[in-house]
Amino acid sequence: MWIRILLTAILIWDLTCGFGFDVYADNMIRIELKRQSLDLNSIRGARIYAKGLSGSSRNFASDNEQIIYLKNYRDVQYFAEIGIGSPPQHFTVVFDTGSSNLWVPSSRCFFSIACYLRSRYKSRLSNTYTKIGKSCKIPFGTGSVHGFFSQDDTKVGGSVIKQQVFTEVTREGYFTFLRARFDGVLGLGFQGTDSKNVTPIWHNMLLQKIVSKSIFSFWLNRDPTSRIAGEILFGGMDWTHFRGQHTYVPVAKSGYWEIETGDLFIGNNSTGLCKGGCPAIVDTGTSFIAGPTTILTQINHAIGAEGIVSSECKYVVSNYGNLMWEHLISGFQPDNVCHRIGLCTYNESSGGSDEPKMESSKSEKLKRNSLCSFCEMAVFWIQVEIRKERSKEIAFQYANQLCEKLPNPGGKSFINCDVFALPHITFTIGNKSFPLSPDQYVIRVEDNLGVRCLSGFTALSVHPRRPLWVLGDAFLRAYHTVFDFGNLQIGFAESA
């Protein structure tokens, strides 16, 4: 008899595990993601932006400066369906940890062509609609969407969140959303600058006891031929989606799912810029990994990616390289070198300049800022070579080569599809290494010419003292991710 009971128990275990259910978690909401193929037009138009709110100069921006992170959703690849209202009206949305709002097009969106190409919410058809009516604006990389707040029951998976506040969008940016293949966005970020203190949907799941655990987990299927593109689990995690244990790191700032990363390695070589720590936003709503131009240029050089040749960058290395070298080997901090050689100047509020204040045209200021940026990058590159005990000639040669590999801020970098010889790119998170193999950071796109390959890295410059990373889907496909808002931490484990 006991053998029959044991066999029955094993059978139940196999069935539950085989279907991917976490038998230790209850009250979970499971969302199956769908995937669309990326096309070159969308990828070329995808941009990520970041700006500080303090208004301080680029040379003296505070490490605590609040950063507004913006994007235009052109490269979004993963979607799922939700319902709003009773009976539910269905919308395809992006589940986005990089924003906070839930928004969908409104039936009152009359003057935006983009609204007519997708599902629109009709409040008159819902028995559970509650009017709010307060207007709002949601910023994006190339503009904003405008609308007003409403309240209605929202169905996510098999559960209904009662009276969720969301935005009915009445005006959408033409270039931002005309080509979009989704209706709206379901933000999984914190109450922040873009949410107008609206309670996020994942928080309401907890408050209404729809889920019992204050976490959600995110898995992207690395098999492009699979019907299931990925899953989000609210209230738990699926152990069949990862290997080993998660490495947890604290959320560094409220407002975003932002963590601190350490050094980044190209192959076995340290890039050095983030040894002291760099912020990184973990973002399910973008396909690429965005990072500081200084390191992205090194990555481009190492993987043979296309880049932009900058004569200004070469001019700086040629005319100021010797001064940079002398200051660095004399022990000056890299942050001060470009000021000492006259390419970067303090602003008036800093109180640190003894130079006379001079009026200059806008073009002169832009040129000076450009030379300052190239100087700061060149100083860093030369310092990397000094630490490797390379000669001056080799250091200058390397810096000049990097001046030919600057990432294009308005596009993406093509690379050879023969990726086997390319180096691993490794992030340091929580003092552990998280490597990306070439097949994980190379994005393959099909067009009329066949399969073409792009680097999964794109440039994002905030300012040189506060380099920022955005870990998008190119990273998240490799690592199963747990967003733990109860303990304000994020966990990563190798994706299965």
Image (tube, rainbow, N blue to C red):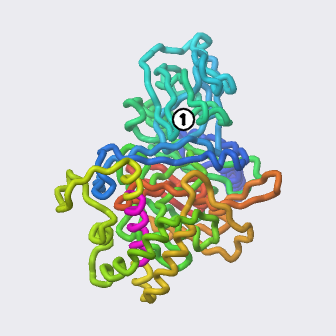
Residue 291 % position (x, y): 49, 59
Residue 198 % position (x, y): 41, 29
Q: Which SS type dominates the magenta stretch?
A: helix
Question: What residue is shown at x 30% (from left), y 71% (from top)?
Answer: 341
- Type of amino acid under label 1: Leu
Residues in magenta, as a range: 369-382
Q: Which one is nearer the viewer's eye here, 483 or 403?
A: 403
Q: Is residue 220 above or below residue 394?
A: above
Q: Which structural element holds mark 1?
A: strand
Q: Residues within 10 Å of mark 1 (few under 14, many from 20)?
A: many
Total numbered badges shown on the rendered structure: 1
Q: What residue is disc 1 on?
A: 186
User: In the image, 85: left or right of 483?
Assistant: right
Residue 199 % position (x, y): 41, 31
Q: Quadrant of residue 123?
A: top right
Question: What residue is shown at x 66% (from left), y 62% (from top)?
Answer: 442
